[in-house]
Image: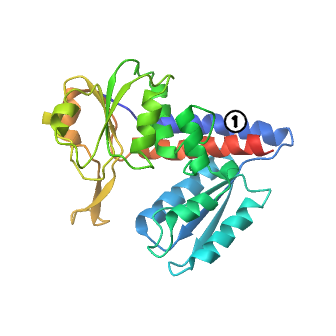
Amino acid sequence: MQILDGKLAAQAIKDALKLDVAQRSNEGKKIPHLAAILVGNNGASETYVAAKVKACEETGFKSTLVRFNSDIDELTLLEEIDNLNNDPDIDGILVQLPLPKHIDAKKVIDAISPNKDVDGFHPASVGKMVEGLPTFIPATPYGIMLLLKHYKIDTKGKHAIVIGRSNIVGRPMSILLSGNSNPGNCTVTICHSHTTNLKELCLQGDIIVAALGIPEFVTADMVKPGAIIIDVGITRVEDSTRKSGFRLKGDVAFDQVAEKTDWITPVPGGVGPMTIAALMKNTYQACIENN
């Protein structure tokens, strides 16, 4: 068993970006500028946004954090996105999800200019990804592909099982793994809440991507020896022994599954850091394309 260490891989990506940004700065060129919108004070969202702002600092990017109270009306939020769309100094825009229930998340995502859609959620970005065209790829699936590439994992011809069909992770992950690329060229099966033979399918998986949001759902009896396990889940579980009052658990029962695998991501420290590294790469690319 070997660890797919997202912290190490993400640091390598950020170090490379830092050099690229320094070179752009020395040449008098524009440096990347990421704008993040945070609505409300959800604890997890606060943590994620803070990590993204910190990553900008580490790589030499500029960042702007726009905060709104949870009772903001939809129109005001859309107007702010329009302002950022029209600000030539802003290269990338992300709106931290989830949003309050009274705001239509799809309408908000669709309002972001495709040229600044560094989260890769806009329909134009998704359409290009499906066609295999250059575009902004959703950060978590992109981060997973970068992680596989960093560790030179051979995926060609392998059977990949993706558990979860969200537009943020599951579906784009299946498209990327099945694409004619490296990593890629997998045969992909998507599983979800209505899959009747999930355990049987997982036991066929050379690669399992668990992205369903249920702590320790994937157990040892669902994994064949030598599998590659990508754990996307991260859930706060109450733990009175911790100062924080909780611990983080993934969708995979790591302690019992790890010994059966060739490679496995930890939680935390696996996919999470790669998601942020991928966002940085998207933002850098937006800066190049927009300037």
Report which quarter residue 67 is drawn in. Answer: bottom right
Query: Percent from the top left, x then y, of residue 192?
Result: 27, 46
Q: Residue furthest right?
A: 28
* Image-based side of 291 in relation to 231, left or right: right
Q: Quadrant of the C terminus?
A: top right
Q: Quadrant of the N terminus?
A: top left
* Image-based side of 281 in relation to 102, left or right: right
Report which quarter residue 254 is drawn in. Answer: top left
Query: Percent from the top left, x then y, of residue 105?
Result: 51, 64
Image coloring type:
rainbow
> Total of numbered circles in the picture?
1
Nearest the viewer among 263 and 74 is 74
Report which quarter residue 89 is drawn in. Answer: bottom right
Disc 1 on helix, strand or loop? Answer: helix
Q: Residue at x 83, y 39 (%)?
A: 26
195 is higher (above) or lower (below) than 112:
above
Q: List the residue tagged with mark 1.
A: 19
73 is higher (above) or lower (below) than 256:
below
180 is higher (above) or lower (below) than 79:
above
Nearest the viewer among 29 and 283 is 283
Q: Is residue 7 visible?
A: no
Give, as a three-letter code, the residue at label 1: Leu
Query: Percent from the top left, x then y, of residue 41?
Result: 47, 73
Nearest the viewer among 181 and 241 is 181
Query: Percent from the top left, x then y, of residue 82?
Result: 71, 66
Q: Is residue 97 visible?
A: yes
